[in-house]
Image (cartoon, grey):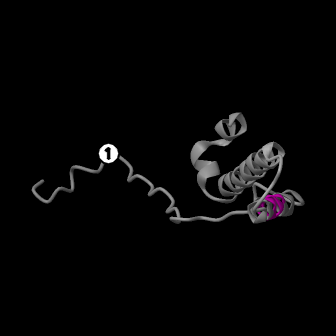
Amino acid sequence: MENGAVYNETTEPQAKPPRRRSFGCTLRHLPGWRLPAKAVQALFSFVAVTCEEIVEDCSSCGGLYFFEFTSCSAFLLSLLILCVYCTDVYETLGEDKVEKL
């Protein structure tokens, strides 16, 4: 009984959790035409922000400032959507929280 043959392990060894890549990129959450559409949206909104910054002088700048705000907001939000749907953040947050967001 000194050799430990009487006592068996009573618990099963735990399975190791799957290793996650530090920056995992997946395209399965934006299938078909959705990924190219979001990429084009980000590109066009970036071009809009750039074109707005080229304007040096204007007589009535209210519309230009509104255009700057909307194009910059569209650019940042489209980048956020691409980052959430194309990385592991989607699995980390969960589908229900992403849909609420």
Observer-nearest residue: 19 or 5? 19
- What span is in magenta? 41-48
Q: Quadrant location of residue 57?
A: bottom right
**Majority secondary structure of magenta residues:** helix
Residue shown at the point (59%, 64%) measured from the top left: 24
Q: Quadrant location of residue 46?
A: bottom right
Q: Amino acid at mark 1?
A: Thr
Q: Which residue is mark 1?
A: 10
Residue shown at the point (83%, 62%) measured from the top left: 44
Observer-nearest residue: 54 or 101? 54
Q: Residue furthest top?
A: 100
Asked whether, in this view, residue 15 is left or right of residue 67, the answer is left
Task: From the top left corner, tell me how far across and down residue 88 is, in percent.
Answer: 60, 56
Q: Quadrant of the C terminus?
A: top right
Decide whether residue 51 is among the magenta residues.
no
Q: Residue furthest front?
A: 59
| Callout count | 1
Q: Residue furthest left?
A: 2
Q: Residue furthest right?
A: 33
Task: From the top left corner, tell me how far across and down residue 61 is, in percent.
Answer: 79, 47
Decide whether residue 45 is among the magenta residues.
yes
Task: From the top left corner, tell me how far across and down residue 70 is, in percent.
Answer: 78, 46
Observer-nearest residue: 65 or 48? 65
Above or below 69: residue 88: below
Asked whether, in this view, residue 9 is left or right of residue 30, the answer is left
Q: Residues within 10 Å of mark 1 (few under 14, many from 20)?
A: few
Q: Secondary structure at mark 1?
A: loop
Asked whether, in this view, residue 77 is left or right of residue 5, the answer is right
Residue shown at the point (72%, 38%) measured from the top left: 99
Asked whether, in this view, residue 50 is left or right of residue 33, the answer is left
